Amino acid sequence: MKLVIAIIKPFKLEEVRDALTALGVRGMTVTEVKGYGRQKGHTEIYRGAEYAVNFLPKIRVEVAVPAEEADKVVEAIGTAAKTGQIGDGKIFVVPLEHAMRIRTNETDADAL
């Protein structure tokens, strides 16, 4: 099993969800996060005063999938989240040792 973690732009969430649903992914966890990479933030003007925004709003999407489906999931997220602009995000794939569905005690692939 693999855990796919994607950091994406907030307005791309619905497109990513639709792409994952089309692949048959049955669940995901979504968290609002802040961060920066090469963008290094930006400056904004509020009531005439300029200030720096160092951490930009992003969405973190986590999906647990069987190992053989990880590449398809990464490709689907990458295609759906891409704008071609700086700050599109990153996708990480990490091994997932064990999973358990609390309600039924199903484990590993059955728990996904």
Image: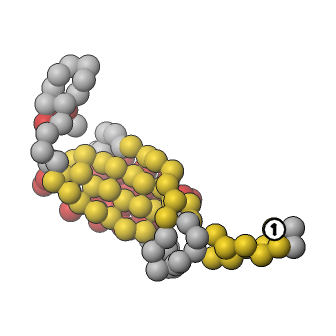
Q: Tag 1: residue type?
A: Tyr
Residue 111: x and y, percent? 19, 32
Instruction: Pinpoint residue 64: horizontal percent, then vertical percent.
Output: 25, 46
Which residue occupies the extreme top position in the image?
Answer: 104
Residue 98 falls in which quadrant of the image? top left
Q: Residue at x 45, y 74 (%)?
A: 37
Q: Secondary structure at mark 1?
A: strand
Residue 67 visible: yes
Q: Quadrant of residue 73?
A: bottom left
Give the residue at x 41% y 61%: 7
Q: Position of residue 66 (x, y in %)?
A: 16, 48
Q: Nearer the viewer, residue 60 or 52?
A: 52
Total number of numbered discs in the rendering = 1
Q: Residue at x 58, y 70 (%)?
A: 54
Residue in front for this viewpoint, 49 or 64: 49
Visible residue check, residue 84: no
| Quarter of the picture holding the C terminus | top left
Disc 1 residue crowd, few under 14, some 14–19, many 20+, Cα 10 Å? few
Tell which of 66 and 53 is nearer to you: 53
Q: Does residue 23 appear left or right of residue 33 in this picture?
A: left
Which residue appears at 16% of the width and 48% of the height? Answer: 96
| Image: 62 above or below 9 | above
Judge left or right: residue 27 versus residue 30: left
In the displayed structure, 80 sits above or below 38; it is above
Q: Is residue 102 above or below residue 61?
A: above
Coloration of the structure image? secondary structure
**Which residue has dot 1 on it?**
46
